[in-house]
């Protein structure tokens, strides 16, 4: 890890009409870090992801990636800058094959269809669904769809990967495989921010956790510190985690 953060979110706010969904959020992420972004429903986690990925503009504040101010960079260009994301509700091009879906990601780094195809196949192998390459994306099971999202994101060769609740709806065995996959991705040097509600999954996995509540950063620190923070227990975790 170097001293300069790969991502620096500076005093970012997002207003939807009367609602301040992000309120002066500042988060800095070190190169190679695996950061957990947690907090209650409606806290503003996906909203923050949407602004980092450029799906919609900030109301105020700045977003810096690798020393460059990308606040004004269009969402369609952020991928070229090295940001990839998965969606809370998986999105695929249903009529296209699994392979073609991942090739959409590969085309970010190559104009050659044969190269895109080779890289997409390698990525499908990496996430463990190469056997489904020719299937229409619509035919995938929910856990396979999560892997397809991951493959499409990885095929863009990101520096920063935003994972929005990729474990939701998975059985414990599938979630364990998902954790293994996230570990392997971070070992390749990809910086990851993951939003996840299942504390038993996210806390052992991440280096650091940031807690959002009502659009603001409520707490941040090592997972072991954050789960003991009285404000976090009161706002989000509840008493069962105090006992644990
Ligand atoms: N496009 C939008 N237009 C209007 N309001 C929005 C929009 N997106 C999010 N919001 C509102 O902003 C607030 C934060 O939503 P967000 O989806 O960021 O929460 P979240 O922390 O991801 O919650 P969850 O854990 O349920 O996914 C909510 O009140 C939500 O209704
Ligand atoms: Mg969300």
Image: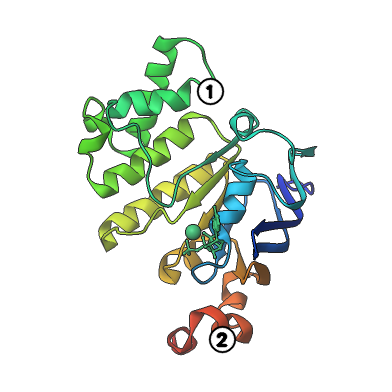
Q: Label 1: which residue?
A: 108
* Residue 136 lies in quadrant: top left
Work out whether residue 32 can be spotted. no
Task: Give coordinates of residue 117: x percent, y percent.
Answer: 37, 17
Q: Is residue 150 left or right of residue 8?
A: left
Give SS at disc 2. Answer: helix
The residue positioned 73% from the left and 52% from the top of the image is: 59
The residue positioned 46% from the left and 50% from the top of the image is: 183
Give SS at disc 1. Answer: loop
The residue positioned 36% from the left and 28% from the top of the image is: 101
* Residue 160 lies in quadrant: top right
Q: Please name whichever residue, 200 or 69, is drawn nearer the observer in this view of the structure.
A: 69
Specify the label residue 234 is tagged with. 2
Question: Mark 2 packing: few (<14 Cα in 10 Å), some, or many (20+)?
Answer: few
Task: Give coordinates of residue 109: x percent, y percent.
Answer: 54, 20
Above or below — where is 109 with respect to 161? above
Above or below — where is 25 with respect to 78? below
Work out whether residue 8 can be spotted. yes
Specify the label residue 162 is tagged with. none
Q: Please name whichever residue, 54 or 228, is drawn nearer the observer in this view of the structure.
A: 54
Q: What colour-coding does the image apply?
A: rainbow
Looking at this view, name the residue that lies furthest to the front.
Answer: 17
Separation of marks 2 and 1 at Cα, in angstroms: 44 Å
């Amino acid at each position: 890890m170097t001293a300069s953060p790969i991502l620096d979110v500076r005093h970012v706010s997002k207003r939807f009409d009367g609602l301040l969904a992000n309120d002066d959020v500042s988060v800095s992420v070190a190169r190679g870090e695996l950061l957990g972004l947690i907090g209650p429903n409606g806290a503003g986690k996906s909203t923050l992801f949407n602004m980092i990925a450029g799906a919609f503009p900030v109301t105020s504040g700045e977003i810096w990636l690798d020393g460059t101010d990308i606040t004004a960079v269009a969402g369609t260009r952020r991928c070229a800058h090295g940001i990839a994301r998965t969606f809370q509700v998986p999105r695929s091009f249903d009529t296209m094959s699994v392979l073609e879906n991942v090739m959409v990601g590969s085309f970010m780094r190559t104009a050659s269809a044969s190269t895109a195809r080779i890289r997409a196949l390698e990525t499908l192998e990496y996430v463990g669904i190469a056997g489904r390459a020719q299937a229409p994306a619509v035919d995938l099971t929910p856990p396979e769809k999560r892997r397809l999202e991951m493959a499409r994101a990885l095929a863009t060769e990101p520096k920063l990967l935003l994972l929005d609740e990729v474990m939701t709806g998975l059985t414990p065995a599938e979630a364990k495989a998902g954790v293994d996959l996230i570990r392997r991705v971070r070992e390749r040097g990809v910086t990851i921010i993951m939003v996840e509600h299942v504390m038993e999954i996210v806390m052992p996995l991440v280096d650091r956790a940031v807690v959002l509540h009502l659009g603001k950063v409520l707490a941040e620190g090592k997972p072991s510190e954050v789960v003991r923070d009285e404000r976090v227990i009161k706002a989000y975790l509840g008493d069962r985690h105090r006992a644990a």
